[in-house]
Amino acid sequence: MFQSLAWAMGQPPGGGGQGGSGDIVMSLLPIFVIFIIFYLLLIRPQQKKAKEHSDMLQTIKKGDKVITSSGIYGLVEAVSERTVTLKIAENVKVKFAKSHIAGLRTTAEEE
């Protein structure tokens, strides 16, 4: 019984006890590569798009033609820190949260 324990605690054949840190680096390398790919393909573009949307929301002013995230087209009547009042028809004004403005409309998108 004690003889089998001695063999179990010995070094592996071929001197494999050396270079343990290289094995750790090589085993973690695929994880680092996957993280870099996720960052370049998913995280970075999403952050860039969020920054562009935030910048667009900061520059909204009265008279801009916008579309909301729910698909409502409107003309900006008033802008406050957190809300935007849109004119969507004659004598119809609706107040939206500023974060729900999806984008500015261009003249090419007119009805």
Image (cartoon, rainbow, N blue to C red):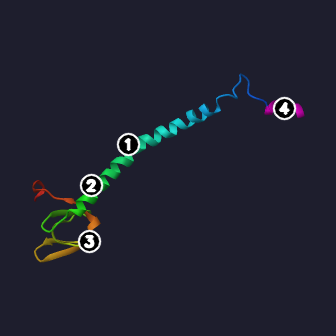
What amino acid is at disc 3?
A: Glu
Instruction: Find disc 4 in the rendering and name its residue.
Output: 6
Please identify, in this view, whether the residue under mark 1 or under mark 3 is nearer the observer.
Answer: 3
Can you say whether 36 is above or below 95 in the image? Answer: above
Verify CB contact (< 8 Å) between mark 1 and mark 2. Answer: no
- Amino acid beneath label 2: Glu
Q: Main secondary structure of the magenta part?
A: helix
Q: Which residue lies at the image location 23% right of the left edge and 59% below the top edge?
A: 56
Q: Report, in whole angstroms, how far the alpha carbon at label 3 lies from the one at label 2.
A: 18 Å
Q: Residue at x 84, y 34 (%)?
A: 5
Label 1 element class: helix
* Residues packed near mark 2 inside 10 Å, few (<14), some (14 to 19) or many (20 plus): few
Residue 65 visible somewhere in the drawing: yes
Q: Which mark is residue 49?
A: none
The image position of residue 88, as x and y in percent, is 15, 70
Question: Which mark is first along the chain, 3 or 4?
Answer: 4
| Screen quadrant of the C terminus | bottom left
C-alpha distance separating marks 1 and 3:
33 Å
Between the residue at mark 1 and the residue at mark 2, the CA separation in whole angstroms equals 17 Å
Mark 3 nearby-residue class (10 Å; few <14, some 14–19, many ≥20): few
Q: Circles 3 and 2: CB distance less than 8 Å?
A: no
The magenta segment is 1-9
Q: Secondary structure at mark 3?
A: loop
Which residue position holds label 1? 40
Q: Which residue is mark 2?
A: 52
Can you give x and y, in whole percent of width and height, for residue 109 in the image? Answer: 13, 56
Q: Earlier in the sequence, mark 1 or mark 3?
A: 1
